[in-house]
Amino acid sequence: MSGTNRSAAVASFDLEELVVHYQKQLREEAFLYLQRRGIAQETVERYRIGFEPGKIGFYVNSNKLGDYFENRVIIPIADAEGAAVDLIGRSIDHREPKYKSLLGVDDIMFNEQILEETEDVILASGVFDVLSLAQARLPAVCVPVWMTFKDSHAEKLREKRVFICLGNDELGRSESVRILTMLQPIAKQALIVQMPESIRDVNDFFVRVQHPLDTFMKLLNETMEEAMMLPIAPDVKILRYIRKNI
């Protein structure tokens, strides 16, 4: 189904109903995949994660969406008011592309509701990085589609301290520098967080590292120390956020 046809189909059907539909289809293979990614049941419920097994087609005006999201966990993208504006499907097997969006909405950041609550935020690579950080009670956002960060996203981070923590590869590092350049004129502070060499991304960090929250907080503070070239106290604002939400 083309993007235009999908948009037309969904326009006549409430995205919120789609979210509920996919939530009802969560089953063992989806839970096992989410468990391997370190995503807890509470987080699955909080972010209304669903699944499309591809065995039973779901029709909207005779257009089959089941084929489109076949064998993918479905993560709703919500606006600042919490209303679903798009859906992201992540394959749980080896099919490509790994991620597919239903509508391709590109001006909303995943988890951007958190921006109203904090002056400090982590800009991560993808939705699973944000989910891992959210479980640790750390404020984080990402653009739903990799490497589409643009001026409208930067504007949402105006006057905030932003920890840029993208993929730990050449593409991630180059994208981090590009975003840093965009944020420096408008953010309170923008910092690139260097992940340990063997770690792919934030989600990988929280799955593989012992005591991941403490170790990640140490990374953030070391990043600030290096930026300021002098020892500083722990990040009081982020620690206060953690304590408030635990």
Image (cartoon, rainbow, N blue to C red):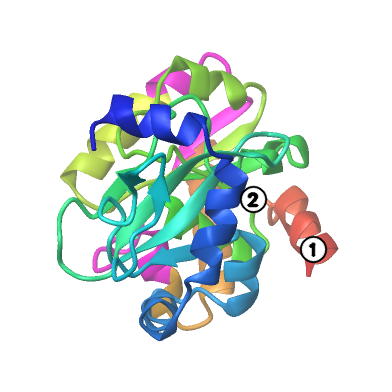
First to last magenta residue range: 181-205
Of labels 2 and 1, earlier in sequence is 2
- Residue lying at 31% horizontally and 39% vertically, measured from the top left: 146
Whole-percent x, y for residue 196 in the image:
32, 64
Which quarter shows the C terminus?
Answer: bottom right
Residue 240 placement: quadrant: bottom right
Which quarter shows the N terminus?
Answer: top left
Residue 194 appears in the figure? no
Residue 60 as seen in the image, left or right of residue 76: left
- Residue lying at 84% horizontally and 61% vertically, measured from the top left: 244
Query: Disc 1 marks which residue?
Result: 245
The local secondary structure at tag 2 comes to loop
* Relative vertical location of residue 207 with respect to residue 107 in this rendering, above or below: below
Whole-percent x, y for residue 107 in the image:
49, 24
154 or 212: which is nearer to us?
154
Q: Which amino acid type is marked by label 1?
A: Asn
Residue 135 appears in the figure? yes
* Relative vertical location of residue 84 with respect to residue 204 in this rendering, above or below: above
Label 1 environment density (alpha carbons within 10 Å; few <14, some 14–19, many ≥20): few
Residue 203 as seen in the image, left or right of residue 100: right
Q: Which amino acid type is marked by label 2?
A: Pro
Whole-percent x, y for residue 141 in the image:
54, 43
- Residue lying at 76% horizontally and 35% vertically, measured from the top left: 116
Could you give the CA–CA distance between mark 2 and mark 1, rounded to whole angstroms? 10 Å
11 or 101: which is nearer to us?
11
- Residue lying at 30% horizontally and 46% vertically, measured from the top left: 100
Query: Disc 2 marks which residue?
Result: 139
